[in-house]
């Protein structure tokens, strides 16, 4: 069964049609990239999938269940996690606390007024594991608001991973990053995909990252699907070159 | 000295000061009742700050729950039974229940809208207290009752005539309340509140039902505010509608911000400054509130912790 099925969704903002009848199916274990020029509707599309706002038309199924009307937190509990184009973190808490919160939520402890020693130990261990994976161990006690942009991005991704998602939505994870940071984040994403078999949908402007990571690519332009296929298909597509790659090169 | 030892040391100093307060209050020109006021208003400000400082939600109507606690306690003694514990229980139940109902109606609101609606609800109770003469005593307040000695079964503690005994009763309840709040803030639940304060959007997309958690925080805050209210009424054996007035709500906010709303003990410090200034300055000039106001402005200008934090987040979003 497909993990995510987006069926013909649209989203209007007044007279503007930000997303216009988009259909997308994501299989378990797939890494799908969504590309397209600025204002194409990519982030809006993510907002529809994650429940930021409801679609004006269409239907969204997650793991076979209709989630079109579900609030965001219920989608998260079902296994959908996301990051944002502009980093969303807890700036005045340290890295450890930023990760601890989603770990506790994922363990079903969010309403707990106390913790047993063993539960506390388990949570610390998991937090340490996530910091290790994200290369954040040395920064454990630093306030996240004071970290570099790249480390903040890494923290946000690890916070999403802390939820043990089945589907991870990443909105331009390398935006605003230097070459080294971009490389580090791509490597992290590749590991999550290849080693852990995590299903990922990725919005990305950096074509090196996209063609390096993606199994399949969807191209959005003006709210609609312009093309869809393997990286080779997309690289050789004349429509895409004309409408998108050509413009980027110019 | 490590941060942890420094923290433990200041904690020990705070409790030592509170435990011995009735014995040095007179030496520094105060009196026991003044110390009790600091505890009571400090508890109310700390309760407000559970919501303001640790959940990031500003209630400008906490006088409602404080006042309901106070009236509940006074009316329980006047109309039901001459028992101090019963008065406290009834006041707390009344204030918490009101908080639970009003909270459920307003948790979807944010920022200024939330603050405005909390004021509006508080004013409703204020007018009820003024208009419902026969029961509340109206403008003149609820009189003709007083707190009663504590009956422990094997003996009585005369908290009515012995100021110090009443102080220690208040201190015990203060300690329990403050201990519970501290415990909650260190728990997974408490961390979800910090998460909401720090970044509501992030918290929601980590799987938190935000409204449910804000509601719980609001109710907990109202519970401890109404506990403070019951003690406030018992302290003066009297209660009038001022305790429900929006300016009283404002005073709690001033205490919290004055002392520092990002720190757990800040509001107690704020309450101490407030109560002491009120006591000293009001005996010299009727304009004591403008002195407090000036002091408030200076603190906000030169220790702009909260303001800075806000700007920093603005710059990022
Ligand atoms: N909440 C909103 N209200 C009104 N208009 C919106 C809203 N969100 C997005 N839009 C509009 O919808 C269109 C698509 O925006 P969106 O952010 O989805 O584009 P994008 O593909 O993510 O672009 P970028 O590559 O710049 O991030 C834009 O014209 C944008 O102004
Ligand atoms: Mg975008």
Image (cartoon, coloured by chain):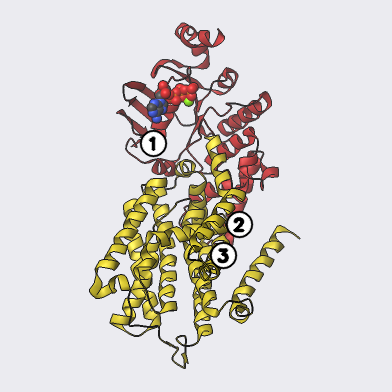
Chain colours: A red, B yellow
Up-down relation of residue A16 to residue B162 (above or below): above
Q: What element carries label 3?
A: helix
Up-down relation of residue A51 to residue B82 (above or below): above
Instruction: Say which residue label 3 marks.
Output: B273
Q: How many numbered discs, if any?
A: 3
Label disc, if present, on residue B203 of the rendered structure: none
Q: Are marks 1 and 3 on the same chain?
A: no
Q: Dot 3, crowdedness within 10 Å: few (<14), some or many (≥20)?
A: some
In which quadrant will I find the C terminus of chain A? Answer: top right
In this view, the residue in front, A188 or B177, is B177
- Give the residue furthest to the front: B285
Q: Is mark 1 on a helix, strand or loop?
A: loop
Q: What element carries label 2?
A: helix
The answer to whether B201 appears left or right of A146 in the picture is left
Mark 2 belongs to which subunit? A
Instruction: Say which residue label 2 marks.
Output: A121
Instruction: Say which residue label 1 marks.
Output: A51
In the rendered image, residue A23, in percent from the top left (x then y), is placed at 36, 23
Instruction: Determine the quadrant in which ligand 1 lies.
Output: top left
- Give the residue furthest to the right: B1
In the rendered image, residue B158, in percent from the top left (x then y), is placed at 47, 89
Up-down relation of residue B178 to residue A149 (above or below): below
Q: Nearer the viewer, mark 3 or mark 2?
A: 3
In the rendered image, residue A232, in percent from the top left (x then y), is placed at 52, 13
């Amino acid at each position: 069964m497909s993990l995510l099925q987006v069926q013909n969704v649209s989203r209007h903002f007044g007279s503007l049609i930000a997303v216009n009848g988009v259909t997308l199916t994501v299989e378990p274990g797939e890494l799908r990239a969504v590309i397209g020029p600025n204002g194409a509707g990519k982030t809006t599309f993510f907002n529809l999938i994650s429940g930021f706002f409801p679609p004006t038309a269409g239907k969204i199924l997650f793991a076979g269940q209709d989630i079109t009307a579900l609030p965001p937190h219920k989608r998260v509990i079902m296994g959908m996690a996301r990051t944002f184009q502009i980093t969303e973190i807890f700036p005045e808490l340290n890295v450890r606390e930023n990760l601890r919160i989603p770990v506790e939520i994922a363990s079903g402890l969010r309403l707990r007024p106390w913790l047993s020693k063993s539960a506390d130990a388990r949570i610390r261990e998991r937090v340490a594991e996530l910091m290790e994976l994200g290369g954040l161990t040395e920064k454990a006690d630093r306030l996240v608001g004071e970290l570099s942009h790249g480390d903040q991005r890494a923290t946000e991704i690890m916070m999403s991973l802390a939820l043990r998602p089945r589907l991870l939505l990443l909105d331009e994870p390398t935006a605003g990053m230097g070459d080294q940071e971009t490389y580090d984040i791509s490597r992290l994403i590749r590991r999550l995909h290849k080693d852990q078999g995590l299903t990922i949908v990725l919005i990305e402007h950096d074509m090196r990252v996209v063609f390096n990571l993606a199994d399949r690519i969807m191209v959005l332009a003006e709210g609609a699907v312009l093309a869809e296929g393997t990286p080779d298909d997309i690289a050789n597509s004349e429509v895409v070159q004309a409408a998108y790659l050509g413009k980027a090169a110019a | 000295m490590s941060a942890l030892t420094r923290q433990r040391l200041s904690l020990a100093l705070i409790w030592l000061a509170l435990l011995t307060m009735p014995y040095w209050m007179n030496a520094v020109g105060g009196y026991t009742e003044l110390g009790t006021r600091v505890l009571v208003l400090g508890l109310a400000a700390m309760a407000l700050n559970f919501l303001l400082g640790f959940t990031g939600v500003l209630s400008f109507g906490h006088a409602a729950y404080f006042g309901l606690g106070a009236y509940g306690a006074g009316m329980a003694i006047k109309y039901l039974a001459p028992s101090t514990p019963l008065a406290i229980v009834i006041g707390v139940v009344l204030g918490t229940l009101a908080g639970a109902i009003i909270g459920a109606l307003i948790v979807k609101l944010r920022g200024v809208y939330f603050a405005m609606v909390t004021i509006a609800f508080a004013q409703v109770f204020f007018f009820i207290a003024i208009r419902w003469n026969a029961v509340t005593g109206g403008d003149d307040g609820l009189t003709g009752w007083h707190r009663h000695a504590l009956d422990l079964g094997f003996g009585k503690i005369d908290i009515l005539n012995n100021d110090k005994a009443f102080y220690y009763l208040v201190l015990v309840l203060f300690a329990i309340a403050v201990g519970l709040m501290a415990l909650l803030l260190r728990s997974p639940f408490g961390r979800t509140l910090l998460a909401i304060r720090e970044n509501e959007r992030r918290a929601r997309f980590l799987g938190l039902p935000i409204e449910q958690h804000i509601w719980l925080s609001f109710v907990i805050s109202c519970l401890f505010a109404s506990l403070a209210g019951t003690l406030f009424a018992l302290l003066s054996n009297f209660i009038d509608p001022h305790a429900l007035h929006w300016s009283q709500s404002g005073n709690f906010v001033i205490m919290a911000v004055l002392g520092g709303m990002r720190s757990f003990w800040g509001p107690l410090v704020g309450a101490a400054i407030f109560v002491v200034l009120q006591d000293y300055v009001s005996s010299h000039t009727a304009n004591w509130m403008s002195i407090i106001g000036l002091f408030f402005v200076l603190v906000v200008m030169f220790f702009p912790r909260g303001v800075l934090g806000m700007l920093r987040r603005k710059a990022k979003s």
